Amino acid sequence: MSQCSPAQYALPHDPALRTAAGKALTFTISLYARNGAIVLKMDQDGQEAQDYIAITEDTMVEIVLKGDQLFFSKAFDAITMKDANLGAFYSNLEYDGYDEKLDRYKIVRFVARFNKGGKFGTTHAFNVNIDLLQKSRRGPRWIGMSIDPDIKNPPPKLN
């Protein structure tokens, strides 16, 4: 069986973009069990049933992990892009929500620059790199995973 590693490009640091973000939005990723099934839910606050991040202007994006077992990766950047050319749109990754006991984070933020003049519904693929906590008698065990939501920049035109 062959395996191929997905491309992961770090977000650059650009102080000029940090101050340009006028709007803020929160994207929540939750992991829980319902009726014997594991449910991974992703949604942008205020947008019912929207599992992508919609960028309509320069924005500070906050991603929050909900659930006792979800934390951002310790081995990789929490957010990576799948295309090296997207650094012009996304930058300045910062961490928050530190759990001192587990030495992991629950919140990250980054700046998203609006794709002015871009085609409606343009998808920018990115990775949310997480560690899934598995508790055992010998202590915590971590399973690294990547979640694959999308950014629509600009989002599709809704009628």
Image: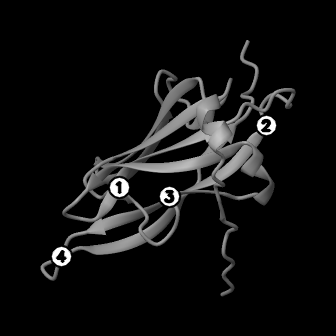
Within 10 angstroms of label 1, few (less than 14), some, or many (20 or more) residues? many
- Looking at the rendered structure, the kind of residue marked 4 is Ser
The circle drawn on residue 78 is 3
Estimate the x, y position of residue 110 in percent, counting from the top left: 55, 43
Residue at the spot of label 2: 122
Estimate the x, y position of residue 123 in percent, counting from the top left: 74, 42
Viewer-nearest residue: 83 or 18? 18
Horizontal placement of 100 versus 81: left or right? left
- SS for tag 1? strand
Residue at the spot of label 4: 136
Nearer the camera: disc 2 or disc 1: 1
Horizontal placement of 115 versus 106: left or right? right
- Looking at the rendered structure, the kind of residue marked 1 is Tyr
Q: Residue at the spot x=35%, y=55% of the render? A: 105
Q: Counting residues from the N terminus, which is met first, the one under dot 3 or under dot 4?
A: 3
How far is mark 1 from mark 3, CA to CA?
A: 9 Å
Location of the N terminus by quadrant is bottom right
Q: Counting residues from the N terminus, which is met first, the one under dot 1 or under dot 3?
A: 3
How far is mark 3 from mark 4, CA to CA?
A: 25 Å
